[in-house]
Image (tube, rainbow, N blue to C red):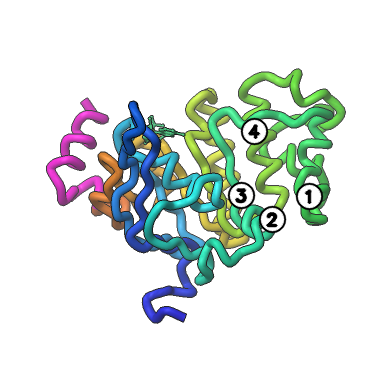
Amino acid sequence: MNSMISSAAAVQFQNVSKNFPGPEGSSVPVLRQISGQIASSSITALIGPSGSGKSTLLSLCNLLITPDEGSIHIQGKDIHSWPITELRRRVGMVFQDSPMLPGTVEDNLRTAHRLHGTDIGSPAEWLEKAELPADLLSRPAQELSGGQKQRIALLRTLAGCPDIVLLDEITSALDPSSVRVIEQLLLELNRQQGTTLIWVTHQMEQARRIAQHIWFLQDGQLLESGNTADFFEHPQTAEAQHFIQGESS
Ligand SMILES: Nc1ncnc2c1ncn2[C@@H]1O[C@H](COP(=O)(O)OP(=O)(O)OP(=O)(O)O)[C@@H](O)[C@H]1O
């Protein structure tokens, strides 16, 4: 094994670049030479201006998209060496608008069991953890409110017991009390199960509340990564200073 690869890292990026097709056959760099590691059992917030590449970086971690250059290791193993179903079992993802699957709420919560045979425990207890009533279980999932769907999408992923959870703006459409419920649920999961969380957020207060580490991206570059308090108190780059000032003004 390459001595630079850390088996203690949940995710390790080495010189990862990604381009998307641009106008008239051109190629637009979206991530440039990203290197860094996310420690196992840590909580990292990915922050940065719109279009900086946060979602793209997240989507690389379970091969929703593939890197053009560089390497990604998940739990010390090259991402392409994992059987894709095993990778997706270990690395769960929740989006801002994760669609509900056809069927009831319970059918949705049992997805990981259906796909991977995972013992998801009691569906009613999962609902309770997100402060949702047990009688939702038999409701058609498509009929839920937006906020309820968002919580079920999260629970559906968590019920599969992933080691790493990728969260893309999952609370931006929720009311403040639902946001707190979701944050507490995820913080508890991290504390109790050691689940690694990589959380894209536009809300700096949320980043301060939940994350131990910050990755700050701009124009596809990882400009800063480090401890959350240090980042907000002493940002090293002019870009991060502007970003933080812009957020608080
Ligand atoms: N499938 C795609 N095809 C072409 N370009 C894409 C694709 N996905 C993303 N992009 C472009 O890549 C850049 C980075 O997008 P990305 O969604 O990763 O940024 P982001 O930091 O998550 O933004 P936001 O905070 O607005 O969600 C943007 O310019 C976007 O238009």
Front residue of 188/78: it is: 78
Of the two numbered discs 3 and 2 in the rendering, the one whose residue sits closer to the viewer = 2
Ligand 1 shows up in the quarter that is: top left
**Residue 68 image point, x, y percent:** 41, 52
Of the two numbered discs 4 and 2 in the rendering, the one whose residue sits closer to the viewer = 2
The answer to whether the beta carbon of the residue marked 3 is less than 8 Å from any atom of ligand 1 is no
Looking at the image, is mark 3 or mark 1 earlier in the sequence?
3
Q: Residue furthest left?
A: 238
Where does label 2 land, which residue? 85
Residue at 67% across / 26% down in the picture? 148
Front residue of 143/15: it is: 15
Of the two numbered discs 4 and 1 in the rendering, the one whose residue sits closer to the viewer = 1
What numbered label is drawn on residue 91? Answer: none
**Residue 116 image point, x, y percent:** 78, 54
**Residue 110 image point, x, y percent:** 80, 43
What numbered label is drawn on residue 115? Answer: 1
Where does label 3 land, which residue? 92
Of the two numbered discs 3 and 1 in the rendering, the one whose residue sits closer to the viewer = 1
Type of amino acid at the residue the image marks with label 3: Gly
Q: Are marks 1 and 2 in contact (CB under 8 Å)?
A: yes
Looking at the image, is mark 3 or mark 2 earlier in the sequence?
2
The span picked out in magenta is 231-249
Where does label 4 land, which residue? 151
Looking at the image, is mark 4 or mark 2 earlier in the sequence?
2
CA–CA distance in space, label 4 to label 2: 24 Å
The number of numbered badges drawn on the structure is: 4
243 drawn magenta: yes
Type of amino acid at the residue the image marks with label 1: Leu
